[in-house]
């Protein structure tokens, strides 16, 4: 009630001199407007820069299988095969900081043959269509393979620009066939040019196929396929091209009887992948995603507290650091500019409040004579200053939003509305009102009522 | 019972090296319901005495009992509350807030009253008080739209909004012509007689002083004469 009355009294006082109040707030209006506009433009640019850096893999995490050790000798990273495609699916399903995952099966570098040309690409990866999403990689021509191709181990592939150049020389490769270790793969699409990575390695020198195709048709490392392949070499009727999906070749042998199975148990091997790549929701979330993945895989792989992990999660710490420092620098820059403009606005408020206190000395004396205490006067002038600043802040928000809208429509700069900037500028303009309104208000509250009443 | 009880009030100003005694030992009592004029030449100390009575200033020594309460030792905040509850001020130059409606002017002291009054009740009280001083039809007028006498009546309504027992008027008719002076003085008299408000008027004007039953004349920081005026209406 009392607060409302003080608010009303302040409003009345401000309304008595509308023009001056309006001009006083102009400093804050421009200050807050500049902050909002710059925050939005800066955010837009920052988001654009972040997206560029993120496409370099700032929010990418890689999960590798752990090391096997025997007799005290470690065989190094990747010497056990513990990651499964189901792990990949589970990470996507259960880790909230994860945007996309893709299992990767690598093939040893083998020549690709097309017509009379051959070429050994840097990387031959078997994966899912999500790979492109994780790596933020588009398809320039044709289309990516889909989930059904992965399920069916279809003989399809995507190739990078370097492979196109080396094997097809200007012709469109889409629809053509190339051979990888005697498996014919149909090219369904060409990847966009990505250039070299940070180590100078050509990223376009790549072939991507469904992981099932690479694992079961090309590398053929499961027991069933090894057996089939071994058998295939002995028979003339079956060509490698005719290799079928695991299990479909079982008919070549008489199935083992129950007694045989008991006598020589064969361990059931899980289908494993060489690597899982994960994209976190943002570069800042990579830490969270790492811990979520670690605890999920502990659970899935039944790893107790004291045991050694059978996997490693790695992030692109260097790129993430660059990204974070860019963002921090940008924010600091804006903060400095904002502080300066609000300081200027605040000094304007202080100046006018001092003038107002002098001009209204008799009013202050009168209020004291009718029973206002020092703190009532202080509160009233402080309220006036804060209201001026808040009104200025509100107008500044409108001005800033309009400016950033105009910048977007006329100059086509990217902008991003920032709720944080709006909240911050409201808080800051209120604080400017309190900080710069305090001295005049304090001065008013310390006036001697007798002299104030007699002031001419 | 005495509303005002001054005992040997002394006030000395120290202007650098110069020591300036303004009140040199004033002892005075004013009973409830009195209407007193305080006169004296310029520099006789009547303004200082008025400030002391109005709890705006502290005496250098002496005791001041207002409504039975010693006020010279009170804190600034407590004296502000005293001013709010126990007295109303009327000034020579009215001291109205510029560009503010009469009703809002009158409501202003309620803002500083300790008790919580709803906005609606405050407005009702202000309306009633303005009607009491004969300005029921000037509720929404600003000071610039009012005559001198009307402005002083708005100031009077403001002084009385908290129903104080004491009204201190400092040259209330100094800026008014003789016709409005008579009207305002009649209003004072009415308030004194009907509502029992104790009124102290500081004035130069012998005609104004003559309307009061008791006249205190000051000279050189002391009370020179304190007499009842037989001519003044009782």
Image (cartoon, coloured by chain):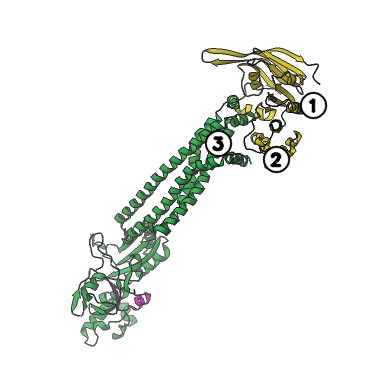
Chain colours: A green, B yellow
Q: Residues within 10 Å of mark 1 (few under 14, many from 20)?
A: some
Query: Going by the image, does B126 lie left or right of A51?
Result: right
Query: Going by the image, does B223 lie left or right of A110?
Result: right
Q: Residues within 10 Å of mark 2 (few under 14, many from 20)?
A: some
Give the structural element (helix, strand or loop) at label 2.
helix
Between discs 1 and 2, the one toward the N terminus: 2
- Dividing the picture into quadrants, the one containing residue A363 is top right
**Residue B24 visible in the displayed image:** yes
Q: Residues within 10 Å of mark 3 (few under 14, many from 20)?
A: many
Closer to the camera in the image, A235 or A155: A155
Give the structural element (helix, strand or loop) at label 1.
helix
Q: Which residue is mark 3?
A: A381
Closer to the camera in the image, A411 or B63: A411
Tell me, yes or no, whether dots 1 and 2 are on the same chain: yes
Residue A189 placement (x, y as % from top left): 31, 74
**Residue A284 visible in the displayed image:** no
Q: Which residue is mark 2?
A: B123
What numbered label is drawn on residue B193? Answer: 1
User: Badges 3 and 2: C-beta atoms under 8 Å apart?
Assistant: no
Q: Which residues are magenta?
A: A147-160
Chain letter, disc 3 residue: A
């Amino acid at each position: 009630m009392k607060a409302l009355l003080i608010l009303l009294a302040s409003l009345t006082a401000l309304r008595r001199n509308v023009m001056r109040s309006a001009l006083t707030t102009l400093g804050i209006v421009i200050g807050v407007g500049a902050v909002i506009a710059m925050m939005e433009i800066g955010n837009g640019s920052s988001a654009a820069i972040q997206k560029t850096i993120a496409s370099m893999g700032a929010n990418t995490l890689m999960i590798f299988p752990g090391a096997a050790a025997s007799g005290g000798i470690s065989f190094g990273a990747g010497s056990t095969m513990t990651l499964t495609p189901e792990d990949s699916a589970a990470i996507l399903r259960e880790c909230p900081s994860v945007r996309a995952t893709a299992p990767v099966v690598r093939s040893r570098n083998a020549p690709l043959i097309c017509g009379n040309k051959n070429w050994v690409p840097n990387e031959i990866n078997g994966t899912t269509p999500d790979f492109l999403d994780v790596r933020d990689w588009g398809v320039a021509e044709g289309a990516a393979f889909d989930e059904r191709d992965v399920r069916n181990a279809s003989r399809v592939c995507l190739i990078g620009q370097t492979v196109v150049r080396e094997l097809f020389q200007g012709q469109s490769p889409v629809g053509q066939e190339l051979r990888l270790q005697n498996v014919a793969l149909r090219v369904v699409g060409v990847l966009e040019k990505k250039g070299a990575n940070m180590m100078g390695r050509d990223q376009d020198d790549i072939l991507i196929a469904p992981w099932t195709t690479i694992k079961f048709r090309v590398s053929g490392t499961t027991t069933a396929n090894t057996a089939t392949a071994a058998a295939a070499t002995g028979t003339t009727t079956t060509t490698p091209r005719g290799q079928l999906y695991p299990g479909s070749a079982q008919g070549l042998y008489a199935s083992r009887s129950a007694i045989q199975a008991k006598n020589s148990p064969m361990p059931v091997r899980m289908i494993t992948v060489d690597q899982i790549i994960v994209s976190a929701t943002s570069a800042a979330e990579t830490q969270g995603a790492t811990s979520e993945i670690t605890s999920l895989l502990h659970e899935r792989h039944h790893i107790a507290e004291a045991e050694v992990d059978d996997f490693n999660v790695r992030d692109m710490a260097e790129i993430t650091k660059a990204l974070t420092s860019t963002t921090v620098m940008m924010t600091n820059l804006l903060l400095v500019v904002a502080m300066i403009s609000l300081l200027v606005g605040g000094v304007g408020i202080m100046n006018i409040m001092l003038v107002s206190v002098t001009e209204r000395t008799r009013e202050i004396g009168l209020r004291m004579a009718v029973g206002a205490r020092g703190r009532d006067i202080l509160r009233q002038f402080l309220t006036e200053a804060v209201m001026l600043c808040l009104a200025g802040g509100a107008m500044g928000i409108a001005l800033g939003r309009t400016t950033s809208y105009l910048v977007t429509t006329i100059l086509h700069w990217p902008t991003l509305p920032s709720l944080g900037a709006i909240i911050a500028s409201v808080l800051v303009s209120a604080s400017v009102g309190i900080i710069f309104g305090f001295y005049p208000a304090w001065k008013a509250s310390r006036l001697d009522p007798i002299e104030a009443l007699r002031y001419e | 019972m005495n509303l005002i009880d001054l005992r040997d009030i002394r006030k000395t100003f120290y202007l650098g090296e110069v020591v300036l005694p303004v009140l040199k030992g004033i002892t005075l009592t004013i009973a409830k319901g009195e209407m007193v004029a305080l006169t004296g030449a310029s520099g006789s100390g009547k303004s200082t005495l008025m400030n002391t009575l109005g709890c705006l200033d502290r005496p250098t020594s002496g005791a001041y009992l207002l409504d039975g309460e010693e006020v010279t030792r009170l804190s600034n905040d407590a004296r502000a509350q005293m001013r709010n509850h126990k007295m109303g001020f009327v000034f020579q130059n009215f001291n109205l807030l510029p560009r503010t409606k009469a009703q809002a002017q009158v409501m202003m002291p309620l803002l500083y009253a300790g008790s919580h009054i709803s906005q609606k009740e405050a407005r009702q009280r202000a309306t009633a008080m303005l009607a009491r001083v004969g300005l029921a039809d000037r509720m929404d007028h600003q000071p610039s739209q009012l005559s001198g006498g009307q402005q002083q009546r708005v100031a009077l309504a403001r002084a009385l909004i908290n129903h104080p027992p004491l009204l201190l008027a400092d040259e209330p008719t100094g800026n008014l012509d003789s016709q409005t002076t008579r009207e305002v003085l009649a209003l004072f008299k009415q308030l004194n007689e009907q509502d029992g408000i104790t009124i102290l008027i500081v004035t130069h004007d012998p005609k104004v002083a003559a309307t009061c039953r008791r006249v205190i004349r000051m000279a050189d920081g002391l009370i020179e004469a304190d007499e009842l005026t037989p001519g003044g209406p009782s």
